[in-house]
Image: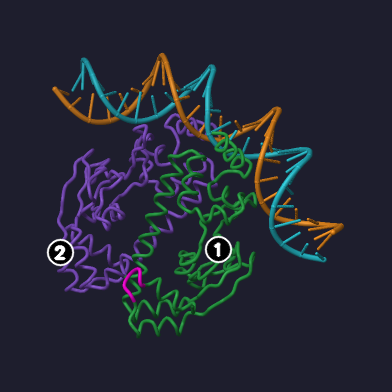
Chain colours: A green, B purple, C orange, D cyan
Amino acid sequence: MLSIEKLNIHFNNFLPLNDEEFDAIASVFVERRIRRKQFLLQQGDVCRHFTFVITGCAKMFAVDQNAKAHNIQFIIENEWATDLSSFYSERPSQLYIEAVESMIVLQISHDDMLNLYTHYPKFDRNFRVIIEQKYIELQDRVLQNISATAEQRYLFFVGQFPHLANRLPLSQIASYLGITPEFLSTIRNNLVKK
Amino acid sequence: MLSIEKLNIHFNNFLPLNDEEFDAIASVFVERRIRRKQFLLQQGDVCRHFTFVITGCAKMFAVDQNAKAHNIQFIIENEWATDLSSFYSERPSQLYIEAVESMIVLQISHDDMLNLYTHYPKFDRNFRVIIEQKYIELQDRVLQNISATAEQRYLFFVGQFPHLANRLPLSQIASYLGITPEFLSTIRNNLVKK
DNA sequence: AAATAACCATAAGATATCTTAAGTTTCGTC
DNA sequence: GACGAAACTTAAGATATCTTATGGTTATTT
């Protein structure tokens, strides 16, 4: 299936696009192949694209003063990979987005995106709903972080993203959970014993 | 100033409303006064309103199996208080929203909100931008939670919300940070000594 | 297939944070 | 202004999590 058709199917979850709107996205989204360890965004660069993932997986992360990386989120098929803050402000990003598996993505430039919003109000609607759903997920993650133990957070992660739990190295999951890989290892060991 | 005018000014931060759109909100938003400790939403109830805060402050929190409350966010003047998940799904909420100071708010019902979206696309746009900004803030908070110590998170909170840090009891801030009030007390004590 | 690098497990000692408890201060209500 | 309730502080012992180190396993590259 063509990538642009997969994007169209994605929008069917919200307000489906008509022919004109489909043509509009078909003419501005560009397909790119990204190899493992390649960056979609690096700290200091302005995030100039909205990226839709067709296949593969990326991680978004920040690096602290001690050069330690912290995974903010994983982005997989049918999800959007963008640093909203940098994208809209057009200022340098504080974040990295890196492929943890080889990927096929569709990208739209900043200007084309604003044009879409202006000419086809449906995109305001669809992206409003998309980000509302992401907001709910993120709020749930915050609740976990302030209320649950590392073991509970790990179990929650595995329950929520069973596919991801297998595809990713443990160290990446540990970074996402906010714990050390060694501690995640002991947690898993304890779970087996139970 | 009339509450509805404050809401109109709020929208001026995004795409300002025209007369027709202003009349539309003026006819559907209802003002309510909420006393301290009164609930805007309780677990088990469906969240039936989108609430805009004119004055005062509320906390959104969840209660865990041990009956311990965890503050997910504070909501102050010019912010929106809603459980998006319950509001759109029309299913019982898992959350509470409670006034920590007496409040004046404007509320719009679920059906009126959907009508607004349908008849005036500008609201899709404006609420898309509003929630995108909230998403960025929340993502930053997640990064803090997975990468920073409790002391760093406290200092960040005070820097980000200096007004809130004074208005709220420490126990409420501790709950927001995901630590015990006793530990926050020692943290503050250590900071003074430094 | 060998060589190298990445990943995972385990454990000991260190640090951050929690729990419990008691005492003090501040706030809200009468 | 007095009283009871809520909020804050302090401290000791308990628990969760981190750091460092080491060895073994699995994946990637040559």
Q: Nearer the viewer, residue B105 or A18?
A: A18
- For the magenta stretch, what is the residue range? A12-16
Whole-percent x and y of residue A51?
49, 71
Report if the CB atoms under discs 1 and 2 are less than 8 Å apart: no
Badge number at residue B185: none
Give above or below for B185 relative to A92: above
Along the horizontal axis of the image, is D29 left or right of A86? right
Q: Residue at x 51, y 68 (%)?
A: A91
Q: Nearer the viewer, residue B156 or B182?
A: B182
- Quarter of the image for the C terminus of chain A: give it: top right
Q: Chain of mark 1?
A: A
Classified by dominant secondary structure, the portion drawn in magenta counts as loop
Badge number at residue A57: 1
Q: Nearer the viewer, residue B75 or A173?
A: A173
Whole-percent x and y of residue B170?
38, 35
Q: Residue at x 35, y 85 (%)?
A: A20
Magenta residue check for A161: no
In the picture of the structure, the residue carrying the numbered disc 2 is: B26
Disc 1 versus disc 2: distance between alpha carbons? 46 Å
Give above or below for B43 relative to A10: above
Along the horizontal axis of the image, is A66 left or right of C3? left
Q: Residue A189 appears in which quarter of the rendering?
A: top right
Q: Residue at x 19, y 67 (%)?
A: B115
Along the horizontal axis of the image, is B116 left or right of A107? left
